[in-house]
Image: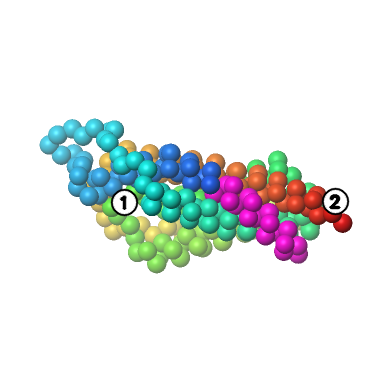
Amino acid sequence: MQYGRILASALFAGATTGLIAALLQLAFVQPTLLHSELYESGELVHFGGELVSAHPALPGFDAMRDGMSILFTVVIYIGYAMVMVALLAIAEQRGRKITPKKGLLWGMCGFITFQFAPGLGLAPEVPGVAAADIELRQIWWIGTVISTGLGLWLIAFGANKGAYIIGAILLLLPHVIGAPEPEVFIGPVPPELAALFAARAFGVGMAAWVLLGLTSAYFWSAEGNRRQDTT
């Protein structure tokens, strides 16, 4: 395993994607989150005696909060890139040619594994909504990610119908079991705002993961070519 190549590729891909993902979150996801916090704090009231504007004044850029958000997003995506590039390295060792175009597909699989599949049972949540026990949700989320990732891997690299069938079962299994659900539904945030938040979280997540697949494959290929040229 070429650990130096993996590390270099992951750092470049993760930092590039993380910065762009952070900017997308600030532009599209954070406004809905800040809007929701106004309802959580009681500053705005849904279904109150008066109509409430759907476009309230929101806080501007906060250097501390938003700066830390950008930093942590970059760090998180570097971690994701480590996983992505390591899997690309394994695939290349098995004779698969890694190209940026194929990296787009890898990125989509990452999105399905880490966001879309878990989100089918545990959708992105605005502040103040009802939720099941956090430990049960964490167990289901981790199990769903593992099951989905293994299922996609078996379908992509399986050598026979048995592997494809097992892969399909693994994709379905977490959703047949079902995610933990709250006892009752509560929350001060309008459902339209909660739906917008979930939609934007999924949209930004998909864009970021596709970009991560593209950049991971690009830097992996470029780093491999560079090392060949220097030997």
Q: Quadrant of the C terminus?
A: bottom right
Residue 194 visible in the picture? no
Up/down of 135 relative to 127, above or below: below
Q: Is residue 119 left or right of residue 89?
A: left
Label located before the other in sequence (1 or 2): 1
Q: Can residue 144 be seen?
A: yes
Magenta region: which residues?
1-18
Q: Residue 127 carries which label?
A: 1
- In magenta stretch: residue 3: yes
Please say if 140 is above or below 41.
Answer: below
Q: Label 1 amino acid?
A: Pro
Q: In which quarter of the image is residue 147?
A: bottom right
Q: Residue at x 58, y 51 (%)?
A: 15
Residue under the image location 31 percent in, 51 percent down: 127
Q: Which disc number belongs to residue 229?
A: 2
Circle 1 Cα neighbour tier, 10 Å, few/some/many (<14 / 14–19 / ≥20):
some
**Secondary structure mostly taken by the magenta-highlighted segment of the chain:** helix
Residue 131 is situated, as x and y percent measured from the top left of the image, at 33, 57
How much space separates mark 1 and mark 2, taking CA atoms? 52 Å
Q: In which quarter of the image is the N terminus?
A: bottom right
- The residue positioned 19% from the left and 47% from the top of the image is 42
Looking at the image, the residue that sits furthest to the front is 63
Task: Estimate the x, y position of residue 121 in percent, counting from the top left.
Answer: 43, 53
User: Residue at horizontal 30%, vertical 39%?
Assistant: 58
Element carrying mark 1: loop
Which callout, 1 or 2, points to the residue nearer the camera?
2
